[in-house]
Amino acid sequence: MADATTQQSSRSRDLDKLLLRPGHLVGPAFEPGTELRDDLQKYVRILVVGAGGLGCELLKDLALSGFKNLEVIDMDRIEVSNLNRQFLFRLEDVGKPKAEVAAKRVMERVSGVNIVPHFCRIEDKELEFYSEFSIIVLGLDSIEARSYINAVACGFLEYDSNDNPQEQTMKPMVDGGTEGFKGHARVILPGMTPCFECTIWLFPPQVKFPLCTLAETPRTAAHCIEYAHLIKWDEVHSGKSFDPDNPEHMQWVYLEAAKRAELFGIPGVTYSLTQGVVKNIIPAIASTNAIISAACALETLKIASGCSKTLSNYLTYNGVEGLHTKVTEFVKDKDCLVCGPGILIELDTSVTLKMFIDLVEDHPKLLVSGASVTHRGKNLYMQAPPVLEEMTRSNLSLPLFELMDKFPKGVVHVTGTAGKGDNRQSCLRKLRVAFKGVDGITDTDMAGGA
Amino acid sequence: MAEPKTKYDRQLRIWGEQGQTALEKASICLLNCGPTGSETLKNLVLGGIGSITVVDGSKVENGDLGNNFMVSESSLGQPKAKCVCAFLQELNDAVKAKFIEEHPVTLIETNPSFFSQFTLVVATQLVEDSMVKLDRICRDANVMLIFARSYGLSGFVRISVKEHAVIESKPDHFLDDLRLNNPWPELKEFTENIDLDTSDPVAHKHTPYILILVKMAKEWAKGHSGRLPSTREEKREFKELIKSKMIALDEDNYKEAIEASFKVFASRGISSNLTRILDDTCSEVESSSSDFWVMVAALKEFIANEGGGEAPLEGSIPDMTSSTELYVNLQKLYQAKAEADILVVEQRVRDILKKIGRDPYSISKAVIKSFCKNARKLTVCRYKLIEEEFNSPILPEMQKYLTDEEYSVAVGFYILLRAVDRFSANYNTFPGQFDGAMDEDISRLKTTAVSLLSDLGCNGSTLTEDLINEMCRYGAAELHAVAAYIGGLITRQFVPMRGTFIFNGIDHKSQLLSL
C-alpha cells in the first residue's frame, strides 16, 4: 500500500535534477526544462543493436534514463551460457529469441516504456528502418556487425557543396564492447568524430594458425582441435558442413582432437577448450558489461539532452589489475570511404544503371560484388529478394541520370559483399555521382533538399 | 537448475574453478539498496556469489521506480530491501538471499558485531560519519569493506581492508619464465645436445627459439667475459648474430628468436616487487601468521637456497615454431623443473608450520602449487583506515592532483563529495536537494569546500565555480546509469584497486587518487 508520502516524489525525481536545472558544464544546445524531459520521452527513438550481455544492460539503463521509445534488434536465441550475465533471461527462456524476451522483461518492470523487438539479422532490415532513429546504440561482439551498422549510419550523412557535413543528417552512434575484464565505450558523430572504419586498426585481425602447422607440427592443444575442426572433419564427413551449435559435432571434434593430442604427446585438450577454440568464445562477465553499458547509456542521454558534455571520444576500461580508465581523442580519417563525403564518380549522362554497376564492381577502391543500388531510399536495382530483383530489373537499361531525376550531382548507396573467400561480409558504400556537362547551378538545392 | 559449468562457462574461462569456488563461499552484506547497491549485487548474484544480505530501512517510493530496476510499480510502499532481495533471488536460485529491514546507520550505531559474520560488506550511499564508524568496526573484525557512492554525474569507490594478499593475480602482460639467460642444469644439457648448425633444413627451421636463444646467450657470454648484451649496441649485435645463423629467409623460428631476444637481456633473479614482499616484516612468521605469509617465508628460504636467487619455475612455455617432438620435450622439461621446485617449497612450508606449532599439513598441496606457479606475481594490497585518509591525506599527492589538469575535475569531485556530507551534517539537507534555495546552497557549499581544503592543509587551493555549481545541480540525485557504472566497478577484480576511484561522468576522465 502506497501511503501519502510515497506519492509525493515524482518518478523522475533524480533525472529531473539534471534535465530541469541549468548548469555550466553542459552541452552547447542544452535547454533545461520540463519540455526537454517530455521531448526525450515523446520524440527520441533509440535503437539498441544486440540483446546480449551489453544489450540487456543497455535496455535497462536507457529505460531508466528517461527514454520511452526503444527498439532492439538481435538474431540470436537464448543459451544457458548467457545466464551468468544477461540478467533479463531465465532458465525457462532458453531457446527463445533474445530480443523478444529482453523487450518483454524490461517493459514488465519499467512501466510506460515501449520496446519493439526485432528478431532478425541486421542486414535484413531496409536502410529506411535505421534512418528512423535518433541515436543508434551498439552492444555487439563482432567487428563485421559493427562495421555494417557504422556504414549504414554514416550512409545517411550528407555533405554540402563545400564538403562540410550537414548536421541534420548526422546519425549519432554510441558503441560499447567488452572482453573479459576489458571494454570500451565510444561516441561516433559521423562527419565530426572518427567512425568505426576510421579507426579500424583498433581491432587487429584474428590470428589464425597456418594449416601446415596443424597438419605437420602441432604443438598445442588448440592446434589439435583446429586440425580436427578444419581438416579432419572435411576428410571424414564429405559434403556435410560442421555446425558449431550441434553438440554431437562438437563432441566428435573433441574426441578427434584428443586422439591427435595423445598421438603427439600434447597435453591440455578438454571439451571446454574445444568449444572455446572452435567457436572463438570470448570470456565475459557481468560487471564489465554493466560498466560499459552504463557509460554508453549515459552518453546517449547526454547526446539526446545536452545535459552534460559528451565523451570525446573513446573510453577504455581495464579491470584486470586494479582499475584503469582512459579517454582518448582519436582523429577522423578525412579520406575515410565510409564517413567521408564519399568517392566521387563522374559519369556521362548516357551511362545506364547496368554500366554503372559494372563500373562500381570493377572499382579498385570499392571492392564490392553483387551490388544493389539505392538513391534517396528508392531502390534502383536490388539483387535480392527475387521479387524485388524482378521489379527493378527494367531499370538496368535506363540511364542513371534519369533514374536520379536529372540532378547534376547526387549520392547513391551501393550494398553488396566485400572481401574474398572466408572473409566475405556485407558492406555498404556511399558514392557521389556527378554528371559531366550538366550545369551545376542546382548545388544549393542539393544542400537543402538532399 | 542449470548445469553450473555451462551457466558459468564464460566466467570460468577467466577465473577458473578455484575463483568460482571462492566466489561461492563468499557472503556479502549490502547496506542501502538504491540503484548503486542493487546493481552491485546483481553482478555478483549472476556470477554465483554464495550468499547476500540486503540491509535497507526505507520503503519504495515513486522516485525509486525511476532509477532502480529491482523495484516495480507493485513494490510501492513496501520495504525496499524485501523487493530488491526478491528480484535478486529470481536471477540465480543458487544464491542464498535474505534481507533485513533496518536503517544501516542504526545497525552501525547499535549492533556493530552484526558485521563480523560476512566476508565482505558493500556500503553504499553512506555519509562520512557513518563510513568512518563502519570502517573501524570492519577493520577490527577483519572484514573486507567497499564503499560506493553515486552523486549526480560523480561518484566514488574505495576499498578498505587491512591486508589483501593475491596469489593468482593474472596480470595482462608479464614476462614468461623461460630462464634463457640462467638455464638450470637439465635445460643446459638439453640444449647442448642440439646442433644449431644442422645441415638438415627441415630440422633447422624447426628448432624452437628457446634453444636458439639459450645457445646464443652462452656463445655471447663466452666472448664477453661472462656478460650478456646490455648496451643498445650490444643488443643490436646480438640480434645480428642470430640473424647470421639463418640459412633460409622463411625461417620463422629465427624471426621469433630475434623478436624474443629481449628475454635474454632481462635481468636475472627476482623483481623489486617480490623483494619488497619477502622483506616485509610479516614474513617473519609466528603461530598466528596467515597461510599466505607462511608460504612467503618458505619462498624466501627457497630463493636463498635451492632457487639460487630465482623463484620457483612457472613451468609453462608459450607456443613457438618447432617440431612437435622438440616442443613437447621442452614442455616436459619445464614442467619437471617446476614440479621439483614445488616439492622443495612444499617441504619448507611443512617444516615452517611445524616450527611455529601448527599442523604441518594445514596448507594443501594444491594451494602451495598455485602459490609457486604465481610466485613472481604475488601482490599484497593494504589500505589505510578511511578516517586516516580523511583527516590526513598524503599532502604532496593532494597538491599535485589539485594543480594537474588531468586530475582537476576528479580531485574537485573528491573534495566536493566530502563537502556535501559536511553540508548535510550542518544543514540537514544536501546542497541543491530542493529547488528553492539553489543560490544560497551554492555559496554555502563553496564555503564548506574552502574550509575543508584548509582543514586538509591545502590553504589557498580553490575549486572552480562551475564544478561547485554542478555539484549543487546534482542535488544528491542517484542516476541509474551512474549507479550501474559504480555498481559494476566494485563487483570483482583480480588485483583490487588501490586508492580512491573518482567517477567523472562529465567527460569520463575518471581517476584513481592515492591519498
Image (cartoon, coloured by chain):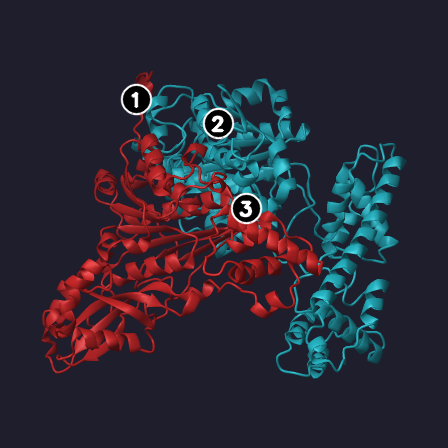
Chain colours: A red, B cyan
Disc 3 element? loop
Q: Which residue is drawn at 62% across and 82% down?
A: B249
Say what amino acid the circle numbered 3 marks.
Cys
Q: Which chain carries label 2?
A: B
Q: Could you give the CA–CA distance between mark 2 and mark 1, rounded to whole angstroms?
A: 27 Å
Q: Position of residue A143 (x, y in %)?
A: 42, 59
Q: Which chain carries label 1?
A: A
Disc 1 element? helix
Q: Do labels 2 and 1 share a chain?
A: no
Residue A7's label in the rendered image is: 1
Q: In which quarter of the image is the C terminus of chain B?
A: top right
In the picture shown, does residue A238 fall above or below B167?
below
Say what amino acid the circle numbered 1 marks.
Gln
Residue ID for mark 2: B89
Residue ID for mark 3: B458
Along the horizontal axis of the image, is A189 left or right of B501?
left
Q: Could you give the CA–CA distance between mark 1 and mark 3, rounded to whole angstroms?
A: 45 Å
Say what amino acid the circle numbered 2 marks.
Gln
Along the horizontal axis of the image, is A256 left or right of B64?
right
- Nearer the camera: disc 2 or disc 1: 2
Q: Which chain carries label 3?
A: B
Q: Residues within 10 Å of mark 3 (few under 14, many from 20)?
A: some
Q: Which residue is drawn at 65% across and 40% down?
A: B18
Determine if residue A264 is in view.
Answer: yes
Q: Position of residue B57 (x, y in %)?
A: 46, 20
Q: Could you give the CA–CA distance between mark 3 and mark 2, rounded to whole angstroms?
A: 47 Å
In the picture shown, does residue B346 fall above or below A11?
below
* Image quadrant where residue B180 sits: bottom right
In the picture shown, does residue A322 fall above or below A449?
above
Instruction: In this rendered view, identify the residue nearer to me: B10 or B454.
Output: B10
